[in-house]
C-alpha cells in the first residue's frame, strides 16, 4: 500500500535505444499498476538525452509496447525537451561546490584504476581534479581538453527503507564521484532522473535491483538540491532459463517479438509481475486483478527465471477466461463473427487468439470432411433427424432422436458426427457449435455435400 495519504506519483523511464523486453515490462507494470491501485498517477518518461543512441523509431516502439500491455500514462515526457531544467540544476550544484571539473581521458582513468588495484586499493576515482590549480586547469584547456563534471559525494552511509528489500544502505565513501555532465556537455541519467523526479513530484521509484548503488548516489544529489528523497523499491531481475540476463541490445524476449508470436499481453503481464514472488503465477481476468495482487514484500531476492514455455501455457489459460468484451474488437480484426456465443463456444480450445479464425471457418464453411464408408448411412439418417426448430438446445434434442434411431452410442455415435460437422477429431463442444453452424450447413455436411 501507499505509505502516504497523498496520491502516489510513479514513473517508467526507458531509454529509446532498443526494443523493450519482459524485464522492462516488469518495471513498467509494477509502477503503473501500483499507481493505478493507489489512485495515483503514472508517468512515461523517455530517457533520451543520449542523442547518439536514442531514436524516434525506438520511442514509437516503446509507446506501442506500453499500449499493448494495457498501460495508459497520465503524462508523457521527453528528457531531451527538458535541457534548460538540467542546465539550472548543474549551475546550482556548481554554486554549492558539489560539482567540479575533471579532465582525465578514459585511458588515464583506466591507468589510474589499474595502479590502485596493484596497490590493493579500490579502483575508485582519487579526486585528483580537486587538487588542480587554476593555472593547471587553464593549461589543460589550452591543450584542447574539455572537462567532464563530477558530483562530489559526502562519503557517508546513505540509508533508506526499501519497499522490496527492507532497510538498505550504501557507503558512498567506497564509490567514485559520479560524472553528471560529459565532455560534450550532455547529461547522464544520474542527474536527469533526479531533476525530473523532484520537479514531477515522483513519490515512489520502483526499479531493478541493479540500481541499488545508484540510489545511494541519487539520494545525495536529491538532498544537495534541497529536496526530500522519494520512497524506493528495488525488485529482482528477470533472467532467461539459462540464468543469462535480458538485454535490449540482444533482443531477448522483446515485447514486439512476443506480440508477433501471438502471446497475450495480459499473460505477459501476469508472468512478468508474479514470477520471482511468493505468489502463484496464474491467469487473471484483467490488469485491475493483477494490480490487486502486487505485494512488494513478497518479491524474492533471487533472480527470477522467465520461461517462454510457461508463457505459452499462460496465454492459453488467459484466453480461456477472457470475456467477449475484452476480445471483440480483435476478433473483428481477424474477420471472426458469431458474437459472444461463438467466443464462449471456442475460447476453451484456443492456444492463440488467431486460432479463433480457424474455428470461425469451421462454422462458416465450406468444409471438406473425411467420412468412413461405414458411417455414410448413419450420417444421412442423422441429417434426416435434424430438428426443424433451431436454438441453443438443438444439440441435445437432436442426439435424443439420433441415438435410438441409429442404435449407436459412445464414440460410434459422437465421433462420426464431429468429423462430419467440423472436419476435426476434437475441438469445442458440438452442443455450442451446432447452433452456430445452422441447420442448412449441418444437413449438407452430414449428407456429404460441401457447406
Image (tube, helix red, strand yellow):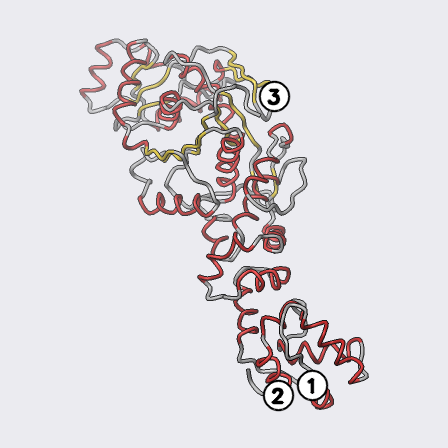
Of marks 3 and 2, which one's residue comes earlier in the chain?
3
Q: Secondary structure at mark 1?
A: helix
Residue 152 is situated, as x and y percent measured from the top left of the image, at 38, 13
Q: Residue at x 58, y 74 (%)?
A: 437
The quarter of the rendered structure image containing the C terminus is bottom right
Crowd class of label 3 (few under 14; some 14 to 19; many from 20; radius 10 Å):
few
Q: Report the Cα–Cα distance between label 3 and label 2.
A: 70 Å
Q: Nearer the viewer, residue 215 or 99?
A: 215
Q: Nearer the viewer, residue 71 or 171?
A: 71
Query: Which is more foreground, mark 3 or mark 2?
Result: 2
Residue 334 is situated, as x and y percent measured from the top left of the image, at 46, 64
Placement of 139 over or under 186, stated as above or below: above
Placement of 227 over or under 248, stated as above or below: above
Q: Secondary structure at mark 2?
A: loop
Crowd class of label 2 (few under 14; some 14 to 19; many from 20; radius 10 Å):
some
User: CB under 8 Å between callouts 2 and 1?
Assistant: yes
Query: Which is more foreground, mark 3 or mark 1?
Result: 1
Give the number of the disc on residue 166.
3
Q: Secondary structure at mark 3?
A: strand
Q: Residue furthest front?
A: 389
The quarter of the rendered structure image containing the N terminus is top right
Give the number of the disc on residue 448.
2
Amino acid at each position: 500500500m501507499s505509505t502516504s495519504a497523498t496520491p502516489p506519483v510513479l514513473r517508467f523511464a526507458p531509454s529509446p535505444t532498443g526494443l523493450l523486453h519482459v524485464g522492462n515490462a516488469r518495471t513498467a507494470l509494477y509502477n503503473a499498476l501500483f499507481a493505478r491501485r493507489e489512485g495515483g498517477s503514472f508517468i512515461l518518461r523517455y530517457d533520451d538525452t543520449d542523442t547518439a543512441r536514442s531514436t524516434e523509431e525506438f520511442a514509437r516502439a516503446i509507446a506501442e509496447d506500453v499500449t499493448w500491455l494495457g498501460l495508459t500514462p497520465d503524462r508523457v515526457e521527453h528528457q531531451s525537451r527538458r535541457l534548460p531544467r538540467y542546465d539550472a540544476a548543474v549551475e546550482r550544484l556548481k554554486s554549492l561546490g558539489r560539482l567540479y571539473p575533471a579532465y582525465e581521458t578514459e585511458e588515464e582513468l583506466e591507468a589510474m584504476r589499474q595502479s590502485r588495484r596493484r596497490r590493493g586499493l579500490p579502483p575508485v576515482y582519487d579526486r585528483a581534479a580537486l587538487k588542480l590549480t587554476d593555472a593547471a586547469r587553464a593549461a589543460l584547456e589550452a591543450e584542447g581538453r574539455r572537462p567532464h563534471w563530477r558530483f562530489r559525494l559526502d562519503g557517508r552511509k546513505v540509508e533508506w527503507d526499501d519497499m522490496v528489500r527492507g532497510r538498505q544502505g550504501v557507503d558512498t565513501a567506497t564509490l567514485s564521484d559520479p560524472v553528471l555532465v560529459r565532455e560534450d556537455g550532455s547529461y547522464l541519467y544520474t542527474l536527469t532522473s533526479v531533476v525530473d523526479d523532484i520537479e514531477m513530484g515522483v513519490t515512489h521509484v520502483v526499479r531493478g535491483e541493479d540500481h541499488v548503488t545508484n540510489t545511494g548516489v541519487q539520494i545525495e544529489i536529491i538532498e544537495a538540491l534541497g529536496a526530500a528523497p522519494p520512497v524506493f523499491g528495488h525488485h529482482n531481475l528477470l533472467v532467461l532459463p539459462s540464468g543469462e540476463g535480458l538485454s535490449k541490445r540482444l533482443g531477448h524476449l522483446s515485447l514486439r517479438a512476443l506480440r508477433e508470436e501471438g502471446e497475450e499481453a495480459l499473460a505477459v503481464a501476469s508472468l512478468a509481475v508474479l514470477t520471482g514472488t511468493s505468489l502463484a503465477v496464474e491467469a487473471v481476468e484483467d490488469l485491475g486483478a493483477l494490480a490487486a495482487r502486487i505485494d512488494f514484500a513478497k518479491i524474492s531476492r533471487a533472480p527470477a527465471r522467465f520461461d517462454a514455455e510457461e508463457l505459452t501455457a499462460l496465454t492459453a489459460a488467459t484466453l480461456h477466461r477472457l470475456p467477449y468484451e475484452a476480445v471483440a474488437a480483435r476478433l473483428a480484426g481477424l474477420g471472426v463473427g458469431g458474437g459472444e456465443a461463438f467466443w464462449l463456444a471456442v475460447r476453451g480450445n484456443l492456444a492463440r487468439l488467431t486460432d479463433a479464425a480457424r474455428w470461425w471457418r469451421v462454422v462458416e464453411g465450406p468444409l471438406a470432411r473425411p467420412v468412413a464408408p461405414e458411417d455414410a448411412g448413419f450420417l444421412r439418417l442423422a441429417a434426416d433427424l435434424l430438428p426443424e426448430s433451431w436454438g441453443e438446445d438443438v444439440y441435445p434434442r437432436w442426439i435424443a432422436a439420433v441415438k435410438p434411431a441409429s442404435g449407436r452410442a459412445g464414440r460410434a455415435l459422437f465421433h462420426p458426427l464431429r468429423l462430419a460437422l467440423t472436419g476435426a477429431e476434437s475441438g469445442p463442444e458440438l452442443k455450442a457449435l451446432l447452433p452456430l453452424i445452422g441447420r442448412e450447413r449441418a444437413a449438407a455436411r452430414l449428407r456429404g455435400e460441401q457447406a
